């Protein structure tokens, strides 16, 4: 019986399905965000690092689990072209993963879970997605949904809301556009919005947030529209450009730019209400509105 289980792990169809599933390259695991201590730490570096942490918590942990699951044998049903990694019990939660080779060459998959003493009852889709035809272990494109509400209900994660993402995974990074609804984890209050990030371990990356949030000080419950574009290089130096409109800003547009060095110390800061501090020439990146790198 044991030999038969391990033989199932080498079925070519299962290997193909396993290879195209999204992996932890969707999380921004970048050495540019190694913690440092400086006298004048950049606030916008901190916001960017917190955003990276939120992505890693909301997506990375789930994808790590996906990789751990598929390391085990799976069963294969030729009639439906479906591989199933049979249910397992961990911390009082039953989970299972299935992946199906569709007729159009794409792959449909889902992680399902239930908190139950038995395998009766309804499975909840906690993560589900579709991988486009032509994807392989090196590069793949697809869509996925992370149901943080369901994960939290089962005690599998902290937070709330939903995340829907379209992605392109490369050999050493990824480009992802994600929409979040009432999304939170232990670092963020619930927000609605969109985040797009593009990163490569050897080059750095960028992350753009467009969210509705209360950014007034002190907070008063009125939401503003916040856009932040952060860019960083492989050494850790970066620049953030922020715009705030609506809410307490009224008809005004509040703009702010901040640059930091590889140690994450502020080297330049300017906003619509403050005088410039530092030299703009110290920034690792130019003004995005001027199309400069």
Image (cartoon, helix red, strand yellow):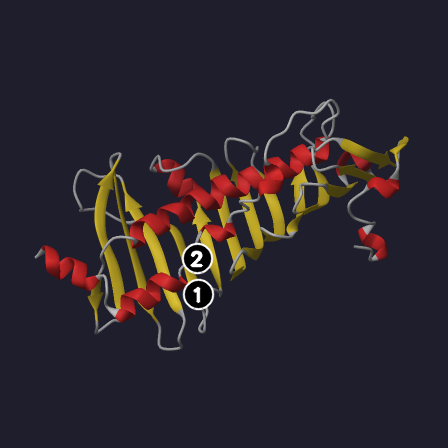
- Find residue 19 and report its image quarter: bottom left
Q: Which mark is residue 131?
A: 1
- The crowding category of the residue bearing disc 2, from other C-alpha atoms within 10 Å (few below 14, some 14 to 19, many at least 20), is many
**Exactly how many numbered labels are in the figure?**
2
Disc 1 is placed on an element classified as strand
Q: Which mark is residue 22?
A: 2
Position of residue 33 in the picture relative to residue 145 (left or right) = right
- Circles 1, 2 touching at the beta carbon (< 8 Å): yes
Image position, residue 123 (x, y; %): 28, 49
Q: Residue at x 47, y 46 (%)?
A: 59
Q: Is residue 141 above or below residue 45?
A: below
Depth-wise, is mark 1 or mark 2 nearer the camera? 2
Q: Residue at x 33, y 37 (%)?
A: 154
Disc 2 is placed on an element classified as loop
Q: Which mark is residue 106?
A: none
Q: Is residue 207 above or below residue 218?
A: below
- The crowding category of the residue bearing disc 1, from other C-alpha atoms within 10 Å (few below 14, some 14 to 19, many at least 20), is many
Q: Residue furthest right?
A: 275
Label 1 or label 2, whichever comes before in sequence order: 2
Image position, residue 201 (x, y; %): 58, 50
The answer to whether residue 104 is visible is yes
Position of residue 278 in the picture relative to residue 13 (left or right) = right
User: Looking at this view, is 231 or 99 the one in front?
Assistant: 231
User: Looking at this view, is 243 or 121 the one in front?
Assistant: 243
- Find residue 37 and report its image quarter: top right
């Amino acid at each position: 019986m044991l030999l038969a289980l391990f033989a199932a792990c080498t079925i070519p169809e299962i290997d193909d399905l396993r290879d195209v599933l999204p992996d932890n390259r969707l999380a921004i695991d970048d050495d540019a965000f190694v913690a440092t201590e400086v006298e004048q730490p950049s606030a916008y570096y901190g916001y960017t690092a917190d955003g990276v942490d939120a992505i890693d918590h909301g997506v990375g942990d789930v994808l790590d689990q996906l990789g751990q699951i598929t390391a085990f044998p799976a069963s294969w049903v030729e009639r439906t072209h479906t591989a199933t990694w049979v249910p397992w019990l961990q911390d009082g939660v039953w989970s299972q993963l299935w992946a199906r080779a569709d007729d159009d060459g794409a792959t449909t998959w889902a992680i399902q879970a239930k908190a139950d003493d038995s395998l009766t009852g309804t499975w909840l889709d906690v993560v589900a997605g579709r991988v486009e035809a032509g994807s392989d272990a090196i590069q793949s494109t697809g869509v996925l949904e992370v149901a943080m509400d369901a994960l939290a209900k089962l005690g599998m994660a902290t937070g709330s809301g939903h995340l829907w993402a379209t992605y392109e995974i490369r050999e050493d990074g990824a480009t992802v556009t994600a929409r979040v609804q009432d999304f939170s984890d232990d670092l963020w209050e619930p927000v609605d919005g969109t985040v797009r990030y593009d990163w490569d371990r050897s080059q750095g990356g960028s992350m753009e947030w467009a969210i509705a949030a209360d950014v007034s000080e002190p907070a008063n419950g009125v939401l503003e529209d916040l856009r932040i574009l952060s860019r960083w290089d492989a050494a850790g130096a970066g620049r953030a450009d922020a715009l705030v409109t609506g809410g307490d800003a009224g008809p005004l547009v509040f703009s702010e730019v901040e640059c930091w060095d590889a140690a994450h110390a502020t080297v330049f800061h300017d906003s619509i209400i403050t005088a410039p501090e530092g030299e703009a020439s110290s920034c690792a990146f130019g003004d995005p509105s001027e199309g400069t790198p």
